[in-house]
Amino acid sequence: MKNTDALIIGAGPTGLFTAHQLKLIGLDCEIVDNLDKIGGQCIELYPDKPIYDIPAVPECTGEQLTNNLLNQLKPFDIKFHLSERVEEVKKEEKNWLVKTSGGNSFLTPNVIIAGGVGSFEPRKFSPKECEKFENKSLFYSVKDKNIFKGKTVSIFGGGDSALDWAIELSKESKVNLIHRRDEFRGAQATVDKMHELKDADKINLFTKYQMANAHGEQVLENIEIKHDNNEIKNLKTDYVLGFFGLIMQLGPIANWGLNLNKKTIEVDTEKFETNQKGIYAVGDICTYPGKLKLILSGFHEGALAARACFKLARPDEKYRFEFTTTSKSLLKRLGKKE
């Protein structure tokens, strides 16, 4: 049995920053994540994709953001429990008893759910033939964009991920962009940029088409795409990328007695606490009026949840807000000289 002031479920950017905020105010915490690596969606889905809305950071990738957050945590000894899923959460007097799939048990007054969209997996292509090329030449996320350099890449989808990667990869690859509709769901500026590249013959655009078949022996050689009018086109391609969104599964969280709303958890906006005292939700998994699914919003939510945790973890102490620029105790925790 491990005792800690707070247990964070999720090692994505919001979970990492929340851990920083907890340690900064003198609380202990540990982090559990069902992925085998730190970074959440940023690492699993778009480690190389540029991110433009982190304050004071004009541009960074998901991997760079994760590394920067880990560097920020270096002064603290944070224990991570990766490839472990929280299976059970139950009340034990004033604490929560949390058990994981890895056999760990935690006793804590505070549980912070920073699990992004919960357990997730990508929506996949329908044709059965696509399965044998998965993780070889057919992917649902990009982990190393360098493999596409100088190759032909066929990208399926009409949202931001498909458009962003079509634009990015068109710099050094031949890109086919295939979408089942004429309209795109991405940001208008991104759609406009894609059309500019199409007009400049940097992107080949096929609308009202879907994947019909994939061919090749050891490696992918070509694909068939089918128009709404049943016309079939054959495209020679080295790689295929599919961006159809995620199938989100809350998993055991659905059984914890929380106030769920369409696979998200309702919280207040003072402490980001759920309907269960001592259980908080921050990041993409929480919802409230005016919610924005941005990383910077998750940072704000985690900072306030951390302060709320102090009251339950240190009931005999009064929390006093301190500025890191002037507080001797905070500078000491950061290992800084006065």
Image (cartoon, helix red, strand yellow):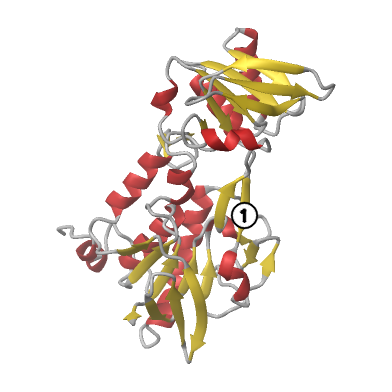
Which residue lies under the disc numbered 1? 248
Judging depth in this view, the residue of 30 and 74 nearest the camera is 30
Residue at 58% of width from left, 23% of height from top?
A: 154
Q: In the rendering, at what x and y percent does residue 200 appear?
A: 60, 7
Residue type at mark 1: give it: Met
Residue at 51% of width from left, 77% of height from top?
A: 88
Answer above or below: position of 108 versus 303. below
Q: Quadrant of the N terminus?
A: bottom left
CA neighbours of label 1 inside 10 A, class few (<14), some (14 to 19), many (20+): some
Residue at 45% of width from left, 78% of height from top?
A: 98
Q: Quadrant of residue 43?
A: top left
Query: Residue placed farthest to the left in the image?
Result: 337
Answer above or below: position of 91 versus 336. below
Residue at 65% of width from left, 9% of height from top?
A: 199
Query: Residue placed farthest to the front in the image?
Result: 217
- Quick check: 236 left or right of 72? right
Q: Quadrant of residue 223?
A: top right
Residue 230 appears in the figure: yes
Judging depth in this view, the residue of 244 and 16 nearest the camera is 244
- Quick check: 1 left or right of 113? left
Q: In the rendering, at what x and y percent does residue 18 appear?
A: 41, 61
- Quick check: 323 left or right of 333? right
Q: In the rendering, at what x and y percent does residue 114 appear?
A: 49, 61
Query: Residue placed farthest to the bottom in the image?
Result: 93
Q: In the rendering, at what x and y percent does residue 303 appear?
A: 44, 62
Q: Quadrant of the C terminus?
A: bottom left
